[in-house]
Image (tube, grey):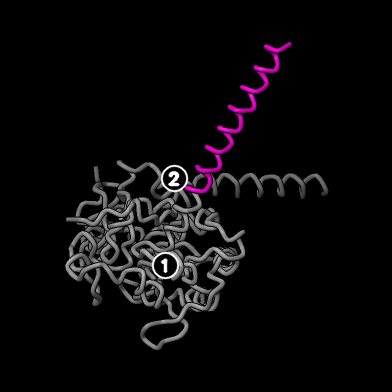
Amino acid sequence: MFRITSVSAFLLVAGLSIQSAYAETPNGVLAALQSEAAKSAPGFQGFSAARGEQFFKQKHGNEWSCSSCHTDNPAATGKHAKTDKPIDPMAPSVNAERFTNPKKIDKWFKRNCNDVLDRACTPQEKGDVLSYLLNVR
Amino acid sequence: MMKNIGNVRWLIAISTLLMSITMVAAYADDDEDEGGNRSMGYERHSSRSGAGEDEGNGGKGRSSMVSNAKWKEECGSCHLAYPPRYLSADSWRAVMSGLDKHFGSNATLDPEVATEIGNFLEQNASKKQQRSTNGIEPPLRISDTKWFKSEHREVSSSIWKNPKVKSPSNCGACHTKADSGSFSEHDVRMPR
């Protein structure tokens, strides 16, 4: 009995660390968003890069869109709309650091979705945008 | 023997010379840091009672170089990480308690990160009470302090309106070493 418990504890710990290591790549983050979206929206049908691109470039009732600071080309260096401070490119193809730190991803989605939409983004929206950014070369 | 004494004399002369050079350099360095606090002014005395005053730090400019990794990263991602010495502690407390509406942007932080940054800002804040020019106390913007207005009184309106400056918050437009915490007048270059 003891052996079974310790084996399952080991598997649990190993599984968790694999999962967290996996989440530290853009594709891992996308997979995590996918399972989140599937749980939160019963009719979830996967992410769409095209929808993500539209979301990224559109305004959502406020003064700013994502592209107000990140520009229409996520492979280019952006510029803060208010302060002009340069912002490193969002596309992982040109900036390998993007979408590798789950805490940072949460922080910026929370802040920027609030600025652009006055609310948090849904897992579907985040996944669509990330799919788009992953497609940009 | 005489030759040895001669050598010793030379040695003393050279080391005295070196020491005085080092002292001059150290003084110049302090002067420069203090200069950072009077950016545009020529009156050192008035600046000594200003926000940039580095009281509590041996009276010299070392505090211009105080740093904290989280402050640098979090406060420096959208704008220059403004040095804590330009606002008093009550201002920093007010800024840190309103990060969800930080001058029109959401700048919320994890609670533990916010605590660390808040402590860093308050510990290195201006010891002198910074008053605002618009009657709203405490001032939330460095550019709203009487000290800032006075320091920049010689800056013409055409400079402020220059698109390369854009806003008084854009220190780096003229203070070429603002990013490293130095606001010395020597490093000021007005954009054309």
Return the residue nearer the eye: B137 or B31. B31
Q: Secondary structure at mark 1?
A: helix
Q: At 41% from the left edge and 82% from the top edge, which residue is drawn? A: B132
Residue on which disc 1 sits: A110
Asked whether B33 or B173 is in front, the reply is B33
Q: Between disc 1 and disc 2, whose residue precedes? A: 2
Q: Which mark is residue B107?
A: none
Quadrant assignment for the C terminus of chain A? top left
Q: Amino acid at mark 1?
A: Lys
In this view, which residue lies farthest toward the front? B2
Are marks 1 and 2 in one subunit?
A: yes
Q: Is residue B175 depicted above or below B115 in this figure?
A: above
Q: Which residue is labeled 2 in the image?
A: A25
- What chain letter is assigned to the residue under label 1? A
Q: Which span is picked out in magenta?
A: B1-28
Instruction: Relative to A49, say whether A122 is above or below.
Output: below
